[in-house]
Amino acid sequence: MKTVVAGSLGECVHVAGVMNFLRLAEAAGWRTVFLGPAVPIEKFISAAEREKADLVGVSYRLTPENGERLLGEFAEAADDLRSRGVRFAFGGTPPVASRASSIGFFERVFDGSDPDEVVLAYLKGQTAGQLAEEDLPQSAVARIRWKAPFPLLRHHFGLPTIEETVSGVAQIADARVLDLISIGPDQDGQANFLHPERQDPRRRGAGGVPVRTPDDYRALFAASRRGNFPMMRTYSGTDDFLELAQMYVDTIQNAWCAIPIFWFNQMDGRGPWDVEGSIREHQKVMAWYGERGIPVELNEPHHWALRDAPDVIFVVTAYLSASNARAMGVRDYIAQMMFNTPPAVSDAMDLAKMLASLEIAESLRGTGFRLWRQTRTGLASYPQNMAEARAHLAASVYVQMALHPHIVHVVSHSEAHHAATAEDVIEACQLARRAIGNALRGAPDMSVDPQVQARKRELLAEAGVTLAAIRALGQSKAPDPLTDPATLAAAVTSGILDAPHLRNNRYALGQIVTAIDKRGACVAVDPKTREPLDESERLARLHAGS
């Protein structure tokens, strides 16, 4: 194990930066020795020799003139150590860091503006002043491992013109604040990319960037080849799925696929397929990415929650998502969990729902099937007041960290007011990064709260009832009813899977009624009495026709 010794030099007593540097060094596998504040030059040298240091971290945060003089003396005294292979790094305020750089003694100088993951990369062996593309993994799993213990950050981005979006991608990449840019095409681009005859010029740029050719995607990817070289991904589209999948991999090296089971079709008005047909097509897409070793995310559960379905259906569809991904040969499955949905759900009940979803999905883990946790803030939960929205983003991300996510999907604080600009994306990521950093320094374990655990157990038991009902629906028709498109479609038309927003939808029953109970959980209720219904009672009423 390599050793780093670090402290604040001379009369400087500020050690917060030193402690953060040593914390990151421990995460990178170093043995650390903290020398404390106001360390004389001689003590630095003797400690480095005594501890057989491989790296010495020096900090000074007072006046630049005094710092420059002191650092010059330090460099002269430590030159023999450096000639013997000991490395030296400096950290301080920007004015002092500038003076430290001019001395030419330190291998790396940090001025406080570098993200933690850049410091971590240095401690893991990246010594250049700027990260190069080859220093940053360009596949999702490799980058998750490279960045640990910090989660990857992703953010959705798409402005009404290609030119604006290309410029924004470059700006975001240069800011080095996120690891993956999710390109959001407009609806016409999602549904009709390969069908110019179906495109409507009046819809151009509605809801996202109007990508119309592979070269549009290539231009977006080229704009990202700078800064911290963020990966890219995009929506799977709502038609011509396999042709689009190949094009996405060819043009933007699609980091992972994101696709639902039941949505993006005629049921929600976003695509040409009926429900059963779209399930079959979505499964083909999962299998296509699985064959190529590319991760797959099923953005399924939150589509039910966005339509006010009860928490138990969120948990059930979390299991269906993982089950279908595994059955289609996916090896790296990304479980997405959207918090704050519906917006009135309490943090405690939200966390319980996510813990139940993870536990039920992780029951499928095994050889050849890995699960990666991704969290996000609810789309519909943001207030329009920007100050309140910023607070909501930070608070939501802090709660999400109780799940130790591998990926945090940052949703901009601007969401309720306007589509995120590059400036909004950068600010949102900075807010999220601070909340994540605070949590990683030692957050209380909210997951062990007795109320949270009780609700988790309740949801798992209830989800078992619902899954059994789906199995029973198709047990005589398919070897595995939970991955059979006809059975899954019938689960929706029969009302086993249902949501209030599906009322009067010809593909769903649309009879369920939900409410937020006194705990802050979203539950099914009797339409007349508003009393909660457990799944056994709700499903029994379906069979009875009441």
Image (cartoon, rainbow, N blue to C red):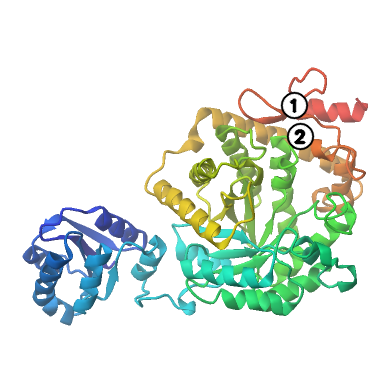
- Where the C terminus falls, by quadrant? top right
Looking at the rendered structure, the kind of residue marked 2 is Val
Task: Measuring from the top left, give residue 489's x and y in whole percent.
Answer: 87, 48
Which residue is nearer to you in this view: 307 or 243? 307
Cα separation, mark 2 vs mark 1, equals 10 Å
Mark 2 vs 1: CB contact within 8 A: yes
Report x, y in % for residue 286. Answer: 74, 63
Mark 2, residue position: 465
Q: Quadrant of residue 510?
A: top right
**Mark 2 residue element:** helix
Residue at image location 63% in from the left, 45% down from the top:
378
Name the outermost residue toward the top: 529
Q: In the orientation shown, which residue stands out farthest toward the front?
A: 202
Report the disc number at residue 502: none
Q: Is residue 544 above or below residue 175?
A: above
Q: Is residue 428 left or right of residue 487?
A: left
> Residue 23: percent from the left, percent from the top?
31, 56
Percent from the top left, x then y, of residue 445? 45, 38
- Inspect this view and state whether residue 85 appears: yes
Q: Residues within 10 Å of mark 1 (few under 14, many from 20)?
A: some
- Of tags 2 and 1, which is closer to the observer? 1
Q: Vertical placement of 389 versus 484: above or below?
A: above
Sequence-earlier tag: 2 or 1: 2
Task: Say few, some or many: other residues with alpha carbon within 10 Å of mark 2 (under 14 / 14 to 19 / 20 or more).
Answer: some
Residue sitting nearer the eye, 318 or 223: 223
Judging from the image, what secondary structure is the residue with disc 1 in? loop
Q: Residue at x 11, y 68 (%)?
A: 70
Give the left or right position of residue 249, taking residue 73 as reference.
right
- The amino acid type, in three-letter code, at marker 1 is Asp
Residue in view at x 38 percent, y 44 percent: 442
Circle 1 sits on which residue? 534
